[in-house]
Amino acid sequence: MAAEENYVIPVAFRRMENLHIVFWLFKDISWCLVWKPLGLAMIVPTLVIAVIIAYRTRQFMSEICHNLSIVFWIAANSYWMITEFYEFDEKILTGSITYRDLTVVPFALGILTLAYYYLLWKPRHKEEPVTL
């Protein structure tokens, strides 16, 4: 019987992930309560830590794909928040497309990243250890 490979998260790295959740929640609470300075300030640590997490998990395809999707999600979410804070979310960019509609680009990149993993990569690498 082959030995199973385990993905172990170091404690310091886990603390960073937990802090990331705190920043994300503060960003979204600030959005809900229209606290512009705090909401805008929380974009940076939330996005930076998401990128660091994605980078640190790059050796595992399942992890990098899911973590890149989170990066795209936070980017889309942050841009959406900015459009609402500065009241240009409903303004027309071209035709019937508003500035808020541009959030679909990073959201779609996140979906495409996961589609690549689940529809293309994972079926072709069934022997690879799964981390999720």
Image: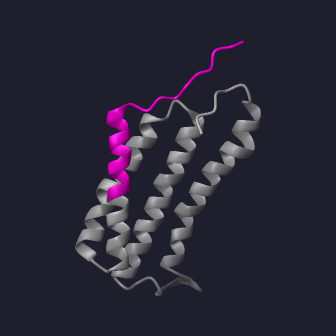
Q: How many marks?
A: 0
Of residues 99 and 112, the one drawn nearer to the viewer in this rendering: 112
Is residue 86 rendered to the left or right of residue 103? left
Residue 99 x, y percent position in the rendering: 48, 78
Q: Is residue 32 magenta?
A: no
Q: Residue at x 58, y 56 (%)?
A: 109
6 over 88 or under it: above or below: above
Q: In which image quadrant can residue 55 be found?
A: top left
Residue depicted at 57% across the width and 55% down the height: 110
Instruction: Residue 18: give x, y in percent of width and height.
Output: 36, 48
What is the magenta range? 1-22
Q: Is residue 128 above or below residue 87?
A: above
Q: State the image coordinates of residue 132 (x, y, percent, origin top left).
A: 60, 39
Is residue 53 or residue 93 the one in the foreground?
A: 53
Colour mapping: one colour
Q: Is residue 124 above or below residue 24?
A: above
Residue 10 magenta-drawn? yes
Query: Is 54 on the left or on the right of 15, as rendered?
Result: right
The image quarter in which residue 129 lies: top right
